[in-house]
Protein backbone atom coordinates (compact mmCIF):
# COMPACT_ATOMS: atom_id res chain seq x y z
CA UNK A 1 0.00 0.00 0.00
CA UNK A 2 1.33 3.39 -0.97
CA UNK A 3 1.51 5.81 1.94
CA UNK A 4 1.18 9.58 1.58
CA UNK A 5 4.47 10.28 3.35
CA UNK A 6 6.35 8.07 0.85
CA UNK A 7 4.95 10.07 -2.06
CA UNK A 8 5.69 13.37 -0.29
CA UNK A 9 9.31 12.35 0.27
CA UNK A 10 9.66 11.44 -3.37
CA UNK A 11 8.07 14.70 -4.53
CA UNK A 12 10.33 16.77 -2.30
CA UNK A 13 13.26 15.81 -4.54
CA UNK A 14 14.18 18.61 -6.90
CA UNK A 15 13.63 16.61 -10.10
CA UNK A 16 9.83 16.96 -9.83
CA UNK A 17 9.33 20.58 -8.79
CA UNK A 18 11.24 23.83 -8.52
CA UNK A 19 10.22 26.56 -6.08
CA UNK A 20 9.11 29.85 -7.66
CA UNK A 21 8.18 33.03 -5.78
CA UNK A 22 8.62 31.21 -2.44
CA UNK A 23 5.13 29.70 -2.69
CA UNK A 24 4.67 27.93 -6.03
CA UNK A 25 5.97 24.54 -7.10
CA UNK A 26 6.47 24.27 -10.87
CA UNK A 27 7.50 21.20 -12.86
CA UNK A 28 10.43 21.58 -15.29
CA UNK A 29 9.59 22.87 -18.76
CA UNK A 30 7.92 20.17 -20.85
CA UNK A 31 6.71 18.10 -17.87
CA UNK A 32 2.93 18.34 -17.88
CA UNK A 33 0.60 16.40 -15.57
CA UNK A 34 0.63 13.22 -17.69
CA UNK A 35 4.42 13.01 -17.82
CA UNK A 36 4.69 13.89 -14.13
CA UNK A 37 2.26 11.09 -13.22
CA UNK A 38 4.04 8.45 -15.29
CA UNK A 39 7.45 9.42 -13.88
CA UNK A 40 6.03 9.21 -10.37
CA UNK A 41 4.63 5.72 -11.07
CA UNK A 42 8.03 4.57 -12.33
CA UNK A 43 9.84 5.99 -9.31
CA UNK A 44 7.33 4.28 -6.98
CA UNK A 45 8.08 0.99 -8.82
CA UNK A 46 4.44 0.46 -9.74
CA UNK A 47 5.54 -1.03 -13.05
CA UNK A 48 8.83 -1.98 -14.64
CA UNK A 49 9.74 -0.82 -18.14
CA UNK A 50 12.69 -3.20 -18.03
CA UNK A 51 10.37 -6.18 -17.52
CA UNK A 52 8.13 -5.02 -20.36
CA UNK A 53 11.08 -4.91 -22.76
CA UNK A 54 12.80 -8.12 -21.67
CA UNK A 55 12.12 -10.91 -24.19
CA UNK A 56 13.44 -13.63 -21.89
CA UNK A 57 10.77 -13.16 -19.22
CA UNK A 58 7.95 -15.65 -18.94
CA UNK A 59 4.48 -14.78 -20.23
CA UNK A 60 2.97 -14.50 -16.74
CA UNK A 61 5.42 -11.81 -15.64
CA UNK A 62 5.05 -9.90 -18.89
CA UNK A 63 1.24 -10.01 -18.63
CA UNK A 64 1.45 -8.87 -15.00
CA UNK A 65 3.51 -5.82 -16.02
CA UNK A 66 1.21 -5.07 -18.98
CA UNK A 67 -1.78 -5.15 -16.65
CA UNK A 68 -0.04 -2.69 -14.37
CA UNK A 69 0.82 -0.41 -17.30
CA UNK A 70 -2.83 -0.47 -18.39
CA UNK A 71 -3.78 0.41 -14.82
CA UNK A 72 -1.36 3.36 -14.93
CA UNK A 73 -3.22 4.79 -17.92
CA UNK A 74 -6.59 4.31 -16.22
CA UNK A 75 -5.17 5.84 -13.02
CA UNK A 76 -3.83 8.77 -15.03
CA UNK A 77 -7.30 9.50 -16.40
CA UNK A 78 -8.73 9.28 -12.89
CA UNK A 79 -6.03 11.58 -11.48
CA UNK A 80 -6.56 14.11 -14.30
CA UNK A 81 -10.26 14.28 -13.48
CA UNK A 82 -9.53 14.76 -9.78
CA UNK A 83 -6.91 17.41 -10.55
CA UNK A 84 -9.44 19.37 -12.62
CA UNK A 85 -11.95 19.06 -9.78
CA UNK A 86 -9.56 20.49 -7.17
CA UNK A 87 -7.62 22.80 -9.49
CA UNK A 88 -8.95 26.03 -7.94
CA UNK A 89 -7.68 24.96 -4.50
CA UNK A 90 -4.31 23.65 -5.66
CA UNK A 91 -3.25 26.01 -8.44
CA UNK A 92 -2.82 29.79 -8.66
CA UNK A 93 -5.43 31.81 -10.53
CA UNK A 94 -3.30 33.88 -12.93
CA UNK A 95 -3.20 32.39 -16.41
CA UNK A 96 0.53 33.06 -16.70
CA UNK A 97 1.32 30.06 -14.47
CA UNK A 98 -0.91 27.57 -16.25
CA UNK A 99 0.48 26.23 -19.48
CA UNK A 100 0.28 22.96 -21.37
CA UNK A 101 4.03 22.43 -21.03
CA UNK A 102 4.28 22.35 -17.23
CA UNK A 103 2.25 22.06 -14.03
CA UNK A 104 2.07 24.48 -11.10
CA UNK A 105 0.65 24.05 -7.57
CA UNK A 106 0.93 25.93 -4.30
CA UNK A 107 3.74 24.68 -2.06
CA UNK A 108 1.47 24.64 1.00
CA UNK A 109 -1.06 22.47 -0.91
CA UNK A 110 1.40 19.68 -1.78
CA UNK A 111 0.05 17.32 0.89
CA UNK A 112 -3.54 18.00 -0.21
CA UNK A 113 -2.49 17.37 -3.83
CA UNK A 114 -1.07 13.96 -2.87
CA UNK A 115 -4.06 12.98 -0.71
CA UNK A 116 -6.85 14.23 -2.98
CA UNK A 117 -5.43 13.67 -6.46
CA UNK A 118 -2.71 11.01 -6.37
CA UNK A 119 -3.24 8.68 -3.41
CA UNK A 120 -6.32 6.72 -4.51
CA UNK A 121 -5.21 6.22 -8.11
CA UNK A 122 -1.71 5.08 -7.10
CA UNK A 123 -3.11 2.50 -4.67
CA UNK A 124 -5.49 1.21 -7.34
CA UNK A 125 -2.57 0.76 -9.75
CA UNK A 126 -0.66 -1.21 -7.16
CA UNK A 127 -3.61 -3.60 -6.66
CA UNK A 128 -4.62 -4.05 -10.31
CA UNK A 129 -1.56 -5.86 -11.62
CA UNK A 130 -2.78 -9.34 -10.74
CA UNK A 131 -5.68 -9.49 -13.21
CA UNK A 132 -6.60 -8.26 -16.66
CA UNK A 133 -9.23 -5.54 -16.11
CA UNK A 134 -11.65 -4.49 -18.82
CA UNK A 135 -14.81 -2.51 -19.34
CA UNK A 136 -18.05 -4.31 -20.09
CA UNK A 137 -20.82 -2.95 -22.30
CA UNK A 138 -23.70 -1.47 -20.29
CA UNK A 139 -21.72 -1.73 -17.02
CA UNK A 140 -19.85 0.96 -15.09
CA UNK A 141 -16.35 0.41 -13.73
CA UNK A 142 -13.65 -2.15 -14.46
CA UNK A 143 -14.29 -5.90 -14.45
CA UNK A 144 -12.16 -9.07 -14.49
CA UNK A 145 -13.11 -12.52 -15.63
CA UNK A 146 -13.72 -14.96 -12.79
CA UNK A 147 -12.39 -18.44 -13.50
CA UNK A 148 -11.71 -21.51 -11.45
CA UNK A 149 -13.54 -22.78 -8.41
CA UNK A 150 -12.57 -20.04 -5.94
CA UNK A 151 -15.17 -18.48 -3.70
CA UNK A 152 -16.50 -15.07 -4.65
CA UNK A 153 -15.75 -12.60 -1.84
CA UNK A 154 -18.64 -11.14 0.14
CA UNK A 155 -19.82 -7.73 -1.06
CA UNK A 156 -18.27 -8.30 -4.50
CA UNK A 157 -20.39 -7.13 -7.39
CA UNK A 158 -20.64 -9.81 -10.08
CA UNK A 159 -22.29 -10.25 -13.44
CA UNK A 160 -22.70 -13.03 -15.99
CA UNK A 161 -22.46 -12.46 -19.73
CA UNK A 162 -25.52 -14.19 -21.17
CA UNK A 163 -23.89 -14.83 -24.53
CA UNK A 164 -20.54 -16.28 -23.40
CA UNK A 165 -21.69 -17.51 -19.95
CA UNK A 166 -18.57 -15.98 -18.37
CA UNK A 167 -18.67 -14.58 -14.85
CA UNK A 168 -17.11 -11.20 -14.09
CA UNK A 169 -16.21 -9.47 -10.81
CA UNK A 170 -16.16 -5.68 -10.53
CA UNK A 171 -12.99 -3.96 -9.35
CA UNK A 172 -13.14 -2.45 -5.89
CA UNK A 173 -10.35 -0.60 -4.07
CA UNK A 174 -10.99 -2.82 -1.05
CA UNK A 175 -8.14 -5.39 -1.25
CA UNK A 176 -10.12 -8.50 -0.21
CA UNK A 177 -12.49 -8.14 -3.15
CA UNK A 178 -9.86 -8.41 -5.87
CA UNK A 179 -7.97 -11.38 -4.47
Image (cartoon, rainbow, N blue to C red):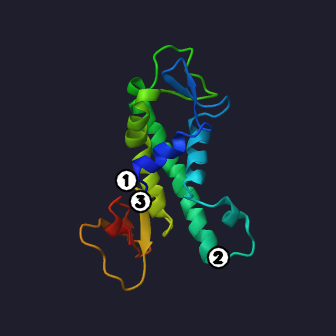
Task: First in sequence, mark 2 or 3: give its number.
Answer: 3
Q: Tag 2 or tag 1, which sits nearer the N-term? A: 2
**Disc nearest the viewer among 1 and 2:** 2
What residue is disc 3 on? 1
Residue visible at 60% across and 31% down in the picture: 27
Separation of disc 1 and disc 2 at Cα? 29 Å
Task: Check the image and report above or below for 128 versus 162.
Answer: above
Outermost residue, left side: 155
For the residue pair 39 and 86, the one nearer the viewer reads as 39
Residue 175 placement (x, y as % from top left): 35, 65
Q: For the point 40% across and 23% down, which residue is it?
A: 88
Q: Which mark is residue 21?
A: none
Q: Quadrant of residue 87?
A: top left
C-alpha gap between disc 1 and disc 3 = 25 Å
Q: How many marks?
A: 3
Residue 140's tag is 1
Return the x and y of residue 91 as percentages of the image width and height: 46, 24
Mark 2 vs mark 3: in front: 3
Helix or strand or loop: what does disc 1 sit on? loop
Q: Which residue is mark 2?
A: 59
Q: Residue furthest bottom?
A: 149
Q: Residues within 10 Å of mark 3 (few under 14, many from 20)?
A: few
Q: Residue at x 64, y 34 (%)?
A: 31
Q: Secondary structure at mark 3?
A: loop
Position in image of residue 38 (x %, y %): 59, 47
Amino acid sequence: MIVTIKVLRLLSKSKYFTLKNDKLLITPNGVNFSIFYQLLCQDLNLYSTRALQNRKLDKTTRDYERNKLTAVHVGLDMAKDLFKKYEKRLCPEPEEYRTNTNMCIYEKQLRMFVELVLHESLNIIEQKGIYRWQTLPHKKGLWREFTGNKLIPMDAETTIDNITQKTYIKFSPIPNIIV
